[in-house]
Image (cartoon, rainbow, N blue to C red):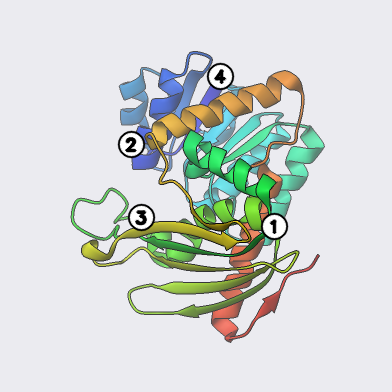
């Protein structure tokens, strides 16, 4: 399958591009980026054409792989789906529920396959844990901590303008939700508050009565960087494994799963654009809760 790569940053080059280049059933058809010079350099690295027009690259591929800020991604994904191209997208799907709805609607209308890349969901040890935990049931609550430290010298993400503007809620919040939702169920209530150094704390209510808490920042002191997910319930306390393998290896699994969706004709992937939209709705509700200092109920 021919993939068009949209994006030229570190994640596009080292995760999307590297995985597509290495995958035996994928061909990298070309690269588009907002900076033509960087698009040319990345395209030369992988020996493919650089495109200066979004629609020209969409026309040249069977599927799009997008590693761009979420608001840019949503527009490209909608255009690609309209053209009948399958979607391999990054989290979060969009920065507004309205934009996410447009992607979902167009993907459904066109009947294209879609996979949204939440890294841990494609790491075998994490995927196995979540399947087992969801089957077991009986969970009362969970606590998620993601303390990143991306603004230190040498970080490839420190210059990311959208991360600086939208913070940990929108960057690593999707990762946390992608772990919690398959085990505890849909979120129906969100409360949120802020802390120092970009900290945001969420208290979530889930269908069925379970609750969870999430604490996030991108600006933790390096010594305080942390990654922890723990579930509590009838069967005791269970910690989610840390996730084996590199991000590029996980992205290779995502490619496998998109190709399987295309080959089978099914459109029910567990992390498709509909799940991506569900995550965006929680993040948007949390943003409202932070701004208004109140609890926000989500529609059924």
Identify the image quadrant of the N terminus.
Answer: top right
Mark 2–mark 1 Cα distance, whole angstroms, equals 41 Å
Q: Which mark is residue 38?
A: 2
Mark 3–mark 4 Cα distance, whole angstroms, equals 28 Å
Residue at x-position 57% and y-position 21%: 60
Q: Measured along the vertical axis of the image, is residue 136 above or below residue 228?
A: above
- Which residue bears the numbered disc 1? 185
Mark 1–mark 4 Cα distance, whole angstroms, equals 35 Å
Which of pointers 3 and 4 lies earlier in the amino acid sequence? 4
Which of pointers 1 and 3 lies earlier in the amino acid sequence? 3
- Which residue bears the numbered disc 4? 2
Q: Name the one closer to the observer, 19 or 65.
A: 19
Neighbor class of circle 2 (other Cα within 10 Å; few <14, some 14-19, many 20+) is some
Toward which corner of the image does residue 258 lie, by quadrant? top right
Q: Secondary structure at mark 4?
A: strand
- Which residue bears the numbered disc 3? 160
Neighbor class of circle 4 (other Cα within 10 Å; few <14, some 14-19, many 20+) is some
Which of pointers 1 and 4 lies earlier in the amino acid sequence? 4
Residue at x-position 49% and y-position 65%: 169
Q: Secondary structure at mark 1?
A: loop
Toward which corner of the image does residue 58 lie, by quadrant? top right
Q: Is residue 183 visible?
A: yes
């Amino acid at each position: 399958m021919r993939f068009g790569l949209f994006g030229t940053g570190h994640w596009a080059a080292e995760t999307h591009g590297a995985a597509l280049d290495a995958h035996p059933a994928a061909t990298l058809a070309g690269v588009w980026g907002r900076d033509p010079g960087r698009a040319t350099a990345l395209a030369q690295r992988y020996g493919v054409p650089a495109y200066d027009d979004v629609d020209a690259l969409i026309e040249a591929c069977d599927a799009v792989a997008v590693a761009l800020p979420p608001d840019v991604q949503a527009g490209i994904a909608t255009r690609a789906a309209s053209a009948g191209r399958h979607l391999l997208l990054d989290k979060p799907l969009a920065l507004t529920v309205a934009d996410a709805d447009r992607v979902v609607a167009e993907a459904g209308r066109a009947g294209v396959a879609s996979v949204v890349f939440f890294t841990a969901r494609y790491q075998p040890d994490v995927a196995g844990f979540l399947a087992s935990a969801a089957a077991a049931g009986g969970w009362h609550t969970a606590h998620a901590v993601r303390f990143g430290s991306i603004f230190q010298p040498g970080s490839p993400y420190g210059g990311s303008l959208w991360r600086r503007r939208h913070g940990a809620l929108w960057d690593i919040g999707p990762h946390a939700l992608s772990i919690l939702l398959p085990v505890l169920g849909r979120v129906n209530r969100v409360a949120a508050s802020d802390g120092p150094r970009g900290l945001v704390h969420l208290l979530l209510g889930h269908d069925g009565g379970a609750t969870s808490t999430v604490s996030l920042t991108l600006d933790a002191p390096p010594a305080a960087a942390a990654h922890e997910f723990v579930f509590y319930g009838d069967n005791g306390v269970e910690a989610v494994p840390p996730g084996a393998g590199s991000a590029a290896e996980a992205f290779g699994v995502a490619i496998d799963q998109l190709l399987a969706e295309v080959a089978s004709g099914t459109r029910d992937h567990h992390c498709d654009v509909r799940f991506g939209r569900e995550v965006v709705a929680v993040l948007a509700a949390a943003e409202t809760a932070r701004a208004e200092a109140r609890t926000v109920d989500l529609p059924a």
